[in-house]
Image: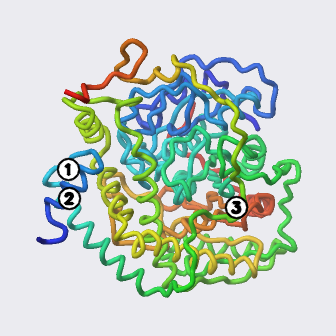
Amino acid sequence: METKLTPAQAAKAIADLQPVLNAAVTIVENPEENTNDGVLAGIPVVLKDNVSTKGLRTTASSKILDNYVPVYDAEIVRRLKDAGAVIVAKASMDELGMGGTNRNAATGPAANPWNPAHITGGSSGGSAALIAAGTTPLAIGTDTGDSIRKPAAYCGVIGVKPTYGRISRYGIIPYASSLDTVGYFTRNIADAALALEVLAGRDDHDMTSSFLPVEKYAENLNGDLAGKTIGVFRTVSDKIERPEIKEAFDALVEQIKNAGATVVDVEMPVNLMELIAPVYKTIANAEATANHSNLDGIRFGMREPGGSVDEVMTNSRTAGFSSYVRARFVIGSYTLFEENQDRLLRKAQKIRRLIVNAYAKLFEQCDVVLAPAAIDVAPLIEESSDVRFGNDNFADEHMQLANFAGYPSLTMPLGLADGLPFGINLTAPAFEEQKLFDTAAGVEKLIDWKEEPACSAK
Amino acid sequence: MEKFSTEYFRKLASDLRFNLSDEEIEELKHDFQAVEAQVDLFETIDTDGVEPMIYPFESATVFLREDEVADVLSREDALANVPDVRMGHVHVPKVVK
C-alpha cells in the first residue's frame, strides 16, 4: 500500500478540508510515529468514529458520547497499529450508525468531495469522503445495511464489507449485532485485498468472529476473468432509469463478456425483494434498541442533571439522542414487546431466512453477482432524508441482502453523471473473499477509473 | 382508547428512559401506521416451518471459556469516563430518601 501523504500531512490535509467536507469528528493533532515495520508501515488511516481508540475521543457521532474517551483499543486498531499504521482522524457518521445520508451526525452533515452540496451517503460517510479526497489510502467503516458500500459508491471509491465474522467487532460501538460488519474503504482492489489480511482473523473477544484461516488475498490476487461466471442481478439492474448509468452498466457487462467471463442473468422473486427494507428495519431497530440501553449517562457519556437516577437517565437520553434515533428506539421497543415478537421480530427473522435462501440460489449459477450499487448518484443534502418508515425501494436497498446473508460484498466506481460518481456492487458467497477480490481486480482493469473529485488533498 | 394514542407513546418513551415532544409523538403516530401496514405485508409470506434466522451462520464460534480471571479493568480505567466520581465510586442522586 502506498500513501502520497505522511501521517502528519494527512492529518493536516483533513484539517484543511474540514471547512468544506466536515468529515472528521476528531483530527489527531500530532500523529505519533509508529515504529512497527509491518505491511502498513507509515500508512495514515482514518477510523469511523464508532471504533474505540484508547485515549482518543470516540463519539459515534452521538451527543450522548460527546465526552467518551475509551480506555482500550478495538481489536482492529491493535491490528492496524501492529502492522505499522498511524491513526490520523476519527470520521463523522450517522448517529450510532443509524442512517444512510450522514446528515444525522452530531457534528452536522458531511459533504461529498465531488460536489459539497450533495450527501456522502452513510452511515460511514466521513470515512468515504476523506478517502475520496485522497487524504489516506485506507479508511475504516462499518456496514450494517450498506453503510460502507453506498457511501463508497456515492463518493467514487472502493468500499468493502467482508463476510460477517471475518473481522473482529471487539471495541466497535454496535448498531445491530446480527448484521454489523467491520469493513473499509480503499482506492484500489490490491489495497483492499491487503487490508483484509491485516484486519481479519479470529478474536476471542468477539464471539461471532470466525475461526476460518485468513488467506493471502493480496499475494494471490488474480484479475483474470476468463473462466469466471458473473451473474448480472437483473431484478435490480432492470430498475436503472438514468441513461448514463444504464449505458455504462450495459457496456461493462459487454466488456466482462469480452474479457472471457461467462455472463448469466440472475433474478430474485420481487415479493421477497420488496420485503428487504421492512425486514431490515424491523431487525435492525430491535437490535439497536437493546444494544443502546447501556447509554444512560451513569457510567460513561454525557450526564444531564436530575433528582433521581431515573431522571438522570431520562434527561441524559432525551438530550443525548437525536429525535430520529429516539423514534427508531420506540419502533424497536414496540417490536420487542412480547405480544408483538411473533408477528414482527420473529416473523422478520423467518422472512430473512427465506430471502437469504432465495439469494443463495443465485450463487448456484455464478461465482459472483454483479449489480448497480445504487440506481442514481448522491442526492442533494437539502433534498435527502432518512426514510423513517415506508416508501421503500428495493433498487436502493438491495445491498442489505449481503448483510442478511453475511456474504462479502464490495462496491467500486463505474462512472460519473452530472459530475457525481455511480458504482457497481459485486458479492460472493460467504468467506469467498479471494473470489470477490479476483473478480473485482479484473473488472477494475476494464473500468480503469482515473477520475478525481474537485475537493481533494493538496 | 385509541391504540396509538399520545399517552401510549409517552408510556413507551418513559419505559425507554427518554422524553418525546408532542411533535415527535405526532410523527411517530404516522410511523406506526407504516409499522402496522408492514405487519400486513409480512403476513403475505408463508413462513410455516421456517426457523427464524438469528445470525447469518450456524457454525459454532461461541464457547464457554474456563472460569479464569482475564481482561481485568483497573478501577482507574473503570471510572475514567464516569461523569461524577466520589471517593472511588460512581456517584448518583440518592436512591433511598
The amino acid type found where label 2 is placed reads: Phe
Residue A371 shows in this picture = yes
Q: Could you say which disc has been placed on residue A376 in the image?
A: none
Q: Taking A347 as reference, is A227 left or right?
A: right
Q: Taking A405 as reference, is A446 left or right?
A: right
Please say if the residues under marks 3 and 1 sit with CB atoms less than 8 Å apart.
no
Residue A413 lies, in percent from the top left, at: 62, 57
**To which residue does mark 1 refer?**
B20
Q: In which quarter of the image is the N terminus of chain A?
A: top right
Residue at 38% from the left image edge and 22% from the top image edge = B90
Residue at 56% from the left image edge and 41% from the top image edge = A172
The quarter of the picture where residue A428 lies is: bottom right
Residue at 55% from the left image edge and 77% from the top image edge = A236
Q: Nearer the viewer, mark 2 or mark 3?
A: 2
**To which residue does mark 3 refer?**
A447
Q: Could you give the CA–CA distance between mark 2 and mark 1, rounded to whole angstroms?
A: 8 Å
Residue at 23% from the left image edge and 61% from the top image edge = B28
Please say if the residues under marks 2 and 1 sit with CB atoms less than 8 Å apart.
yes
**Mark 3 on the same chain as mark 1:** no
The quarter of the picture where residue B8 lies is: bottom left
Instruction: Return the chain for callout 3.
Output: A
